[in-house]
Image (spheres, rainbow, N blue to C red):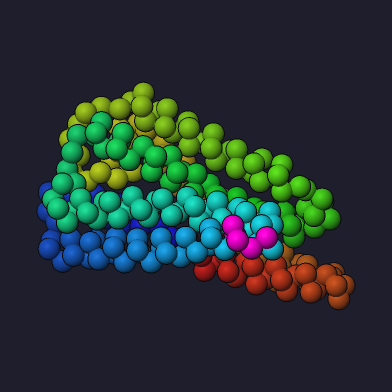
Amino acid sequence: MNATSTSSALEDSSGEGQVSELCMDIVKVSLLFFGIFGIFGNFNIILATYTHKSLRSKCGLLLAILAFCDFWCLAFELLSAVRILTNTAEMPRKHCFWSISFYLFIENVESYMIFAVGFDRLLAICLPIKYMLFRARYYVPLIIVPGVVYSVTLMVLGIVYLDDATIPVCNPPLAYANFTADVWNYTTMIICLTTIIVYVSTYTMLYKIAPKHASLNALAQIKVQKIMVKTLTVC
């Protein structure tokens, strides 16, 4: 969903001081393509959730929040594309950090939200009765809080260790100073690994464990859950 990895590829090449023209073209096209179509898709998810009450379930709201985060991440990636196209990507780290500070915050919330949506599905499968009793007005904010705390913590670290070194490309990895960048890299990898574990566990429950002990009514619910999980995996 997010084109940050594309920017990171450019960042790594720039560190060596050699960026081929083909690599630059691929980066530019990727940023523009994924940015434009991703923004369009996320906007429609947000709009659909706002206009259709049936979509404002606990999972639906979490998906809308994830789409909101990704919408802004992709918008900032389009800004990165403009900077690359106009040869204004190089700048002091301090200027970069503050110019994309909202992006830095929302991008970390998004990373957590991908995990949160997967955890929500696993919870709905493992504890279906209790899950149905949770009220969205309390459940959704409670699920979001850890992601906000994580993002605020990284922002504080980013400010504390911020320096004014010149960086070749203004993107999340380089906007952080060395220590904060290391923390960001490690925590992001942990979140990604945890997310994979959650989705694998969900698939195991849906396709291996739950069907063996399910009633006809439960099987119908499992079928719905399978459709939702497949959709989440594609997203």
Query: Looking at the picture, how far across and down is residue 231, in whole percent?
Result: 58, 69
Prevailing SS of the magenta stretch: helix
* Residue sitting at x 62%, y 54%: 61
Left or right: where does residue 78 sit relative to residue 209? left
Examine the structure image and report whether residue 186 is included in the region drawn in magenta: no
Q: Residue at x 65, y 72 (%)?
A: 227
Q: Residue furthest top?
A: 160
Is residue 229 or residue 201 the one in the foreground?
229
Q: Check the image and name the residue furthest to the front.
A: 51
Range of magenta residues:
49-53
Q: Position of residue 7 (x, y in %)?
A: 28, 53
Tell which of 55 and 22 is nearer to you: 55
Residue 41 in the image: x percent, y percent? 46, 65
Q: Can you give x and y, in whole percent of width and height, for residue 50 in the image?
A: 59, 57
Is 51 magenta? The answer is yes
- Residue drawn 38% across and 43% down? 103
Q: Is residue 132 above or below residue 89?
A: below
Q: Is residue 64 left or right of residue 19?
A: right
